[in-house]
Image: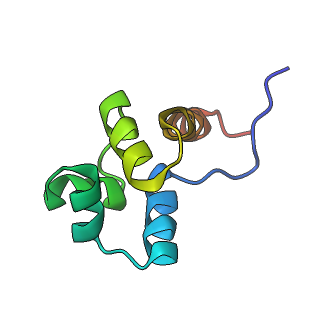
């Protein structure tokens, strides 16, 4: 049985929540990830999918596993593509 959650959130929302909880801005996250601010702004705005490389950098910055981020992206993609009934 394939369960579909009633509501799902994009990874970008979790990234924003993590930034707020830690008191970080995009510049701080970019520094911790070893990337430019543009990449972080794209990820925070939801204009960038979580790829394996990005997931590894988020793992480094936040301490959450790369699999967490990849699974979150996959869940979001599946939820958005579900047929509306």
Q: Is residue 50 visible?
A: no
Answer with the quarter of the image where residue 23 lies.
Answer: bottom left
Q: Is residue 53 visible?
A: yes
Question: In terms of depth relative to the viewer, which is nearer, 26 or 43?
Answer: 26
25 vs 62, left or right, is left
1 vs 68, left or right, is right
Question: In terms of depth relative to the viewer, which is nearer, 56 or 72?
Answer: 56
x, y (%) of residue 52? 37, 29
- Colour convention of the picture: rainbow
Q: Which residue is depicted at the point 52% across and 75% down?
A: 21
User: In the image, is residue 17 above or below residue 1?
Assistant: below
Question: In terms of depth relative to the viewer, which is nearer, 22 or 78?
Answer: 22
Which quarter shows the N terminus? top right
x, y (%) of residue 56? 37, 36
22 vs 3, left or right, is left
x, y (%) of residue 5? 75, 43
Q: Which residue is depicted at the point 43% across and 44% down?
A: 59
User: In the image, is residue 38 above or below residue 27?
Assistant: above
Which quarter shows the C terminus? top right
Residue lying furthest right in this view? 1
Q: Which residue is depicted at the point 30% across and 62% down?
A: 29
Residue lying furthest bottom in this view? 23
Question: In terms of depth relative to the viewer, which is nearer, 12 or 36?
Answer: 36
Q: Which residue is depicted at the point 61% across and 39% down?
A: 79
């Amino acid at each position: 049985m394939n369960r579909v959650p009633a509501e799902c959130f994009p990874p970008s929302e979790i990234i924003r929540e993590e930034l707020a909880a830690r008191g970080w801005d995009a510049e701080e996250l970019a520094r911790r990830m070893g990337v430019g601010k543009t990449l972080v702004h794209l990820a925070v705005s939801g204009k960038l999918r979580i790829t394996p490389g990005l997931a590894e950098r988020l793992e480094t910055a936040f301490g959450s596993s790369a699999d967490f981020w990849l699974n979150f992206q996959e869940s979001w993609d599946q939820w958005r593509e579900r047929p509306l009934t």
